Image: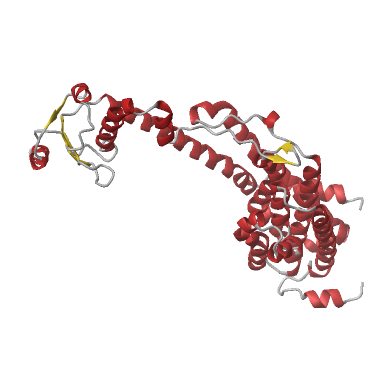
Amino acid sequence: MHNLGVVINFEVIRTLKKKSFWITALIFPVVICIVFAIIYFSNLATNQAATETKNQHFTLAITDESGLIKPTLLAEFKASTINNKQKGIDAVTNGKLDAYFYYPSDISNQSVEVFAKDVGLFDNSRYQSVAQVLLEQSVAPNVSPQVTSILQGKVNFDATTYKDGVPYDGFAQLIAPGLFLVLFYILIAMFGNQMLTSTTEEKENRVIEMILTTIKARTLIIGKILSMIALAFIQVITILIPVVLIYLVAKDQLGLPIIDLSNIPIDPIKMIIGALIFIFSFLLFTGLLVAIGSMVPTAKEAGGFFGVVMVFIFAPLYAVTLFISAPDSPLVTFLSLFPLTAPIPLMLRNAVGNLPPIEATLGIIIIAVSAVVVLMIATRLFRYGALEYSKRLSLRTVLGRKR
């Protein structure tokens, strides 16, 4: 194992020199920047358009059969009244008026009709807004401010929930342990292909014979796994730094909420459970990809098996509501304890807080044992399959051979 450091150093430096690694690492922050820029300029354009629309004046006439509209408001809006609905419509179509509002006698059962000159898709909304304002301001003096707030849905609620007699904020509690689930997803989605091709590159380049003359297969495969883990965290840091900087610099311009990290509760037990599930799940996933890369002669052929692994890993996401609403169901238990589907259910349930200690312990043991077994099988597969350039290695044949 004295060459382990050499393997890790070589794999890390070789990958860091590849443009594809940095493109993959930076594409996420770049996309985030583009999205934030679109949001910012869109909000800016919308606010400017709304201000311009607010300052614009248009000729207006109404027919009020409901008797709700106050004459004083009509004077403020410089609106006239028309006794005949058809005359109002004709005035708009003939260009004598910009807008005409018809308020029926029973507004609760009939629609307020707006007839207006087209001034563009965005600006056309001003007519309905003015018609609504005329109604609201006309009836507001007849209703108490409290009733108005209730009817407009502007009542604020401050809810406090308790768990075991202590105030408990379920959403805040899941933030810290939920980061393991987010990190696991990012690593797999953005780094899975790199893990897969790591063990097939030398086979396709026909240099594996020279490597194996100086380095043992076990040392090589362990070094590759450790180097991939190191590269994965380098990539995560590369992603997080720009995102954090964008948030700190432009949170006010983008209208982002202020996040106070000091108010995020940290449950040590949940964090330990989440960390263990994440570590062993990542090792299990890495071992699977190494095993696949060792069995097949090319990275292209390995892609098909990679898709199958991804289906098992992410299939539980389709039952995400079940993990929250029915954590005791047999299906949730099965998905939480079956090695290939367990990572996401266990991390999600741990974050939500419905993962019992016994099930958490059993799940961690199952994933840990599975990871060790898969890594052992992957090493054995690599030993026998490193020199297979033209055919797929048979798992039954390899495991049936004597050491």
Residue 59 horizontal side relative to residue 152, left or right: left
Q: Which residue sits at x=71%, y=66%?
A: 330
State which quarter of the image contains the C terminus: bottom right
Quick one: 186 or 131, which is closer to the camera?
131
In the visual, does 60 lie left or right of 194?
left
Is residue 75 shown to the viewer in this render? Answer: yes
Residue 151 position, x and y percent, is 40, 36
Left or right: 288 in relation to 40: right
Query: In terms of depth relative to the viewer, which is nearer, 139 or 367?
Result: 139
Quadrant of res 26: top right
In this rendering, the answer to whether 344 lies above or below 12 is below
Image quarter of residue 132: top left
Residue in front for this viewpoint, 96 or 186: 96
Q: Is residue 366 left or right of residue 48?
A: right
The one nearer the camera, 251 or 389, is 251
**Quarter of image, res 291:** bottom right
Question: Eyeballing the image, is 325 above or below 141?
Answer: below
Total numbered badges shown on the rendered structure: 0
Can residue 10 be seen in this snapshot? no
- Residue 341: x and y, percent? 71, 62
Counting from the top left corner in percent of width and height, residue 357 is at 81, 52
* Above or below for 105 versus 386: above
